[in-house]
Image (cartoon, grey):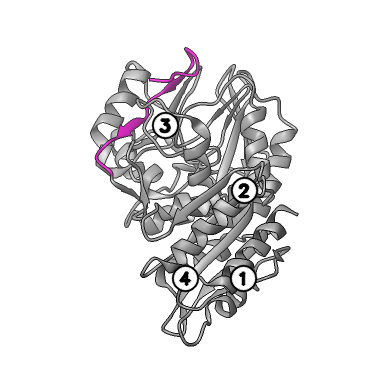
């Protein structure tokens, strides 16, 4: 268990039973649902866990409390993977007071039919403090990161920011892996639409002296926190993390794939110094592909015309980009069509909702298969990408 200190104890659980988080994100290394106990003159339990882990979580809580009765249950976020055991906790510890935002307290009545919080709840106003003794929590509203009721809290004596889903990642805590890729995929997929709101809470956090960040998923972050803060600043401001060219394609009979591969080879031949990444959208993990589109500075979309629009995997990919506010990138287009190429027109229409995009010329049009004219267009697109 990743205890923060003798006074701040970890009581969360690892989930290796799950295959799809939130019904769509593949999590081959599982998930963690984090919960903490603060032991002082008064005791506070911070958040619960997924409903499938009620018993082990309550055992962890009891072990940390060592026979004491908790004074408070602090709820930072009402998503069920964190709040599912509020009612069970109150049955086990009927003397505890629930502390949460006013919106979270209202949601509890929706999630738990018949739950009576009369005399057992306390709304956490912005900047309100919860004194536990030597430890004190200050509540920082974080609306739409990524639900409207979300709170962060800051414990001043040990300088710990409890960040709800912020700074979280996919993966259980008993699996060693690099933080960035799965934190990026988690952020872009789940929080990515709400960059402005994340920027607002980052500004609030900048005023705090933070020694550790304790999210509701993933490891407690310690040491030099600049890496994590810089990544979050880039992701939430829609700034590319690095110069690179991400080529996302769909192909029916291989001709559009051939055009995408020709572009990658041509870029290498023309001396591309940045990464060039090819992605077959039909076979890729879609959230990972979306995250890579946000990671790199340039994107090439290559797809066939299909039923007068674009191939389904490309259509879904575009929907994920636009839903998450894709912007501040350079984009090239490759279309294929045997008798009526329409893909580039459709892609432009989809991308029209995105801010600050630079659409490169030429658009490459492949009529069924590559020929001299379309190969020349690929070469010209490569030059434009490297200009």
Residues at marks 2 and 1, CA–CA distance in whole angstroms = 29 Å
Task: Please give the name of the residue rendered at 57% of the width and 59% of the height, measured from the top-left corner.
Answer: 324
- Distance of mark 2 from mark 4, alpha carbons? 31 Å
| Mark 1 vs 4, N-terminal side | 4
Closer to the eye: label 2 or 4: 2
Pointers 2 and 3 in contact (C-beta within 8 Å):
no
Cα separation, mark 3 vs mark 1, equals 40 Å
Disc 3 is placed on an element classified as: loop
Labels 2, 3: front one? 2
Label whose residue precedes the other's in the sequence (2 or 1): 2
Q: Position of residue 186 (x, y in %)?
A: 48, 45
In the displayed structure, 161 sits above or below 104; it is above
Q: Which mark is residue 351?
A: 1
Describe the element under mark 2 as helix, strand or loop: helix
Boundaries of the magenta span: 1-18
In this rendered view, identify the residue nearer to me: 59 or 98. Answer: 59
Instruction: Identify which residue, 223 or 150, lies in the foreground.
Output: 223
Tell me the residue that label 3 is attached to. Answer: 35
- The quarter in which the C terminus is drawn is bottom right
Q: Residue tagged by mark 2?
A: 269
Q: Give the side of residue 55 with respect to residue 313, left or right.
A: left
Query: Dividing the image into 4 quarters, which one contains the N terminus?
Result: top left
- Measuring from the top left, give residue 256's x and y in whole percent: 46, 67
Mark 2 or mark 4: which comes first in sequence? 2
- Is 255 one of the magenta-colored residues? no
């Amino acid at each position: 268990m990743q205890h923060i200190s003798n006074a701040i104890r970890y009581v969360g659980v690892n989930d290796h039973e799950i295959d799809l988080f939130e019904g769509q994100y593949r999590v081959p290394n599982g998930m963690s649902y984090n919960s903490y106990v603060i032991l002082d003159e008064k005791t506070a339990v911070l958040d619960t866990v997924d409903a499938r882990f009620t018993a082990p979580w309550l055992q962890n809580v009891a072990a940390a409390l060592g026979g004491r009765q908790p004074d408070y249950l602090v709820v930072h976020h009402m998503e069920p993977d964190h709040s599912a055991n509020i009612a069970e906790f109150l049955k086990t510890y009927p003397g505890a007071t629930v502390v949460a935002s006013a919106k979270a307290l209202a949601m509890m009545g929706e999630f738990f039919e018949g739950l009576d919080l009369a005399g057992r709840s306390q709304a956490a106003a912005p900047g309100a403090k919860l004194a536990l003794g030597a430890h004190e929590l200050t509540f920082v509203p974080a609306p739409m990161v990524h639900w409207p009721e979300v709170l962060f809290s800051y414990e001043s004596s040990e300088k710990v920011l409890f960040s709800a889903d912020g700074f979280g990642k996919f993966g259980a805590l008993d699996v060693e892996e690099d933080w960035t890729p799965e934190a990026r995929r988690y952020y872009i997929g789940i929080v990515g639409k709400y960059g402005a709101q994340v920027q607002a809470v980052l500004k609030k956090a900048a005023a705090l002296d933070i020694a550790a960040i304790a999210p509701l998923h993933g490891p407690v972050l310690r040491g030099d926190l600049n890496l994590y803060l810089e990544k979050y600043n880039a992701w939430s401001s829609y700034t590319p993390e690095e110069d690179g060219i991400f080529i996302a394609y769909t192909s029916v009979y291989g001709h559009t794939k051939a055009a995408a591969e020709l572009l990658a080879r041509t870029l290498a031949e023309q001396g591309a110094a940045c990464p060039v990444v090819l992605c077959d959208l039909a076979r890729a993990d879609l959230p990972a592909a979306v995250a890579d589109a946000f990671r790199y500075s340039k994107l090439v979309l290559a797809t066939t015309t299909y039923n007068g629009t674009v191939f389904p995997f490309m259509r879904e990919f575009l929907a994920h980009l636009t839903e998450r506010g894709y912007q501040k990138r350079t984009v090239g287009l490759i279309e294929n069509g045997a008798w009526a190429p329409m893909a580039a027109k459709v892609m432009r229409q989809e991308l029209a909702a995105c801010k600050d995009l630079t659409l490169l010329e030429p658009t490459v049009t492949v009529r069924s298969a590559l020929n001299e004219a379309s190969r020349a267009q690929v070469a010209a697109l490569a030059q434009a990408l490297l200009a």
